Image (spheres, rainbow, N blue to C red):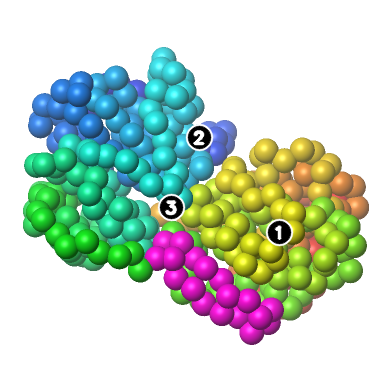
């Protein structure tokens, strides 16, 4: 893999989660463009820089030791990548303070470097949170590959920060450079809420939660077919999002024990708040993690999963396949993984390579619900 070379550092970087013969690199031309632009501003060791949505630590690891850098974002895997890449390049794993998107970052900051996220609601929430956190004369610089840069990103910068200048494209990457101006305080429109009829619950959704405006159609297909009569089973909602699968299951299985896991800090925050609203002080474990990587082997009886088919802008079944493997490791012999997936993704044959029995629980014209028994 090529090195990331900028005026700040020369780094050997890896993506998360790691996979053999990784076809993709852990940085792109937008990272290089941001770092080169900041270097031209000649920051000092005292310059306070906030990095938002750093995919695998390319920005923050480059800046560590050169400026006062803080990293914030909504991905557990991104933070894990930053720690591993700091160590990989001879620095302490905690050389850069990391603030999950579920928590507030505290300025003032002289420069803010933003990788434009796929979900513009997350960008909007982050820009709103910058109110009162910018030093006089601060600059906010957002970057993306041109093909992933919607016009709305510039509109948001202008609305919440100030006038925006778009750079020329370099290696198919572009910067949006916002100059701060006085703005009236704005209340965040997030979290959003929607109600379900079955089960009769209200679900709160922080800015980066998948399908935060309403139930996604895969989950809608899954809900009527969640396993019943689980007794005291140990159940995990893998990739829990706002927690709807676990909450619906828990309402039907009052004695079962639940663990909710997602790599999005905002998803975990939403799921924890939704669990409390629906189930009060009933015991639960809710955590941000790399799927079930942190789960003890043979410690679960049931895993529920609506697997993702993309990581940021990269589409594929790598993450789903990894989640299936993790579920198999965590399940007891005789335990079961229940999933919903688009018909065309062919999950049945993939699960058959890992589990001793795979059956179709239900189907719609677009989705299948599968049960895989270990």
Dot 2: what SS? helix
Residue 204 within the segment the image draws in magenta: yes
Horizontal side of 39 relative to 339 (left or right) equals left
Numbered disc in front, either 2 or 1: 1
In the image, is residue 206 above or below residue 8? below
- Residue 221 in the image, given as x and y percentages of width and height: 66, 77
Instruction: Report which residue position mark 1 lands on.
Output: 281
Q: How far apart are labels 2 and 1 at the CA level?
A: 31 Å
Rendering coords of residue 212 (x, y %)? 48, 69
Q: Nearer the viewer, residue 64 or 116?
A: 64
**Residue at coordinates 60% horizontally, 57% vertically from top-left?**
272
Q: In this rendering, which labeled residue sits more in front, label 3 or label 2?
A: 2
How many angstroms separate mark 3 from mark 2 (CA)?
16 Å
Magenta-colored span: 190-207
The part of the image, by quadrant, that contains residue 303 is bottom right
Dot 3: element = loop
Q: Which residue is mark 2?
A: 80
The quarter of the picture where residue 366 lies is bottom right
**Of residues 21 and 178, which is closer to you in this image?**
178
Q: Identify whether 163 is placed above or below 332.
A: below
Q: What residue is shown at x 54% (from left), y 39% (from top)?
A: 17
Reading the image, the residue beneath label 3 is 312
Residue 173 image position (x, y, % from top left): 22, 47
Q: Is residue 108 above or below residue 320?
A: above
Report crowding for label 2: few under 14, some 14 to 19, many 20 or more residues within 10 A (C-alpha). some
Q: Nearer the viewer, residue 305 or 373?
A: 305
């Amino acid at each position: 893999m090529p090195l990331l070379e900028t005026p700040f550092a020369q780094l050997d970087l890896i993506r998360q989660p790691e996979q053999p013969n990784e076809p993709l690199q852990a940085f792109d031309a937008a990272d290089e463009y941001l770092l080169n632009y900041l270097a031209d501003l000649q920051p000092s060791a005292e310059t306070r820089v906030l990095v938002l949505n750093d995919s695998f630590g390319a920005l923050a690891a480059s800046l560590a030791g050169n400026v006062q850098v803080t990293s914030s974002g909504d991905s557990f895997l991104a933070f894990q990548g930053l720690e591993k890449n700091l160590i990989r390049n001879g620095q302490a794993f905690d050389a850069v303070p990391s603030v999950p998107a579920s928590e507030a970052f505290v300025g003032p900051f002289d420069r803010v470097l933003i990788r434009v996220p796929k979900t513009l609601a997350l960008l909007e929430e982050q820009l709103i949170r910058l109110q009162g956190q910018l030093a006089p004369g601060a600059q906010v610089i957002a970057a993306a590959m041109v093909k992933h840069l919607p016009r709305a990103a510039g509109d948001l910068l202008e609305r919440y920060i100030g006038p925006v200048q778009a750079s020329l494209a370099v290696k198919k990457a572009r910067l949006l450079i916002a100059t701060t101006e006085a703005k009236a305080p704005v209340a965040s429109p997030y979290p959003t809420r929607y109600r379900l009829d079955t089960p009769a619950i209200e679900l709160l959704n922080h800015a980066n939660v998948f399908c935060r405006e309403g139930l996604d159609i895969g989950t809608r297909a899954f809900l009527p077919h969640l396993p019943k009569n689980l007794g005291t089973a140990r159940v995990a909602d893998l990739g829990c999002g706002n927690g709807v699968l676990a909450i619906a299951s828990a309402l039907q299985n009052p004695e079962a024990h639940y663990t909710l896991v997602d790599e999005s800090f905002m998803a975990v925050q939403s799921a924890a708040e939704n669990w409390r609203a629906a189930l009060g002080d009933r015991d639960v474990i809710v955590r941000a993690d790399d799927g079930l990587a942190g789960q003890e082997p043979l410690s679960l009886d049931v895993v529920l999963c609506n697997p993702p088919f993309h990581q940021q802008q990269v589409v594929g079944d790598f993450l789903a396949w990894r989640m299936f493997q993790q579920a198999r490791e965590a399940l007891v012999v005789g335990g079961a993984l229940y999933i919903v997936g688009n018909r065309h993704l062919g999950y049945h044959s993939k699960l058959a390579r890992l589990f001793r029995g795979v059956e179709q629980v239900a189907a719609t014209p677009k989705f299948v619900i599968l049960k895989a028994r270990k």
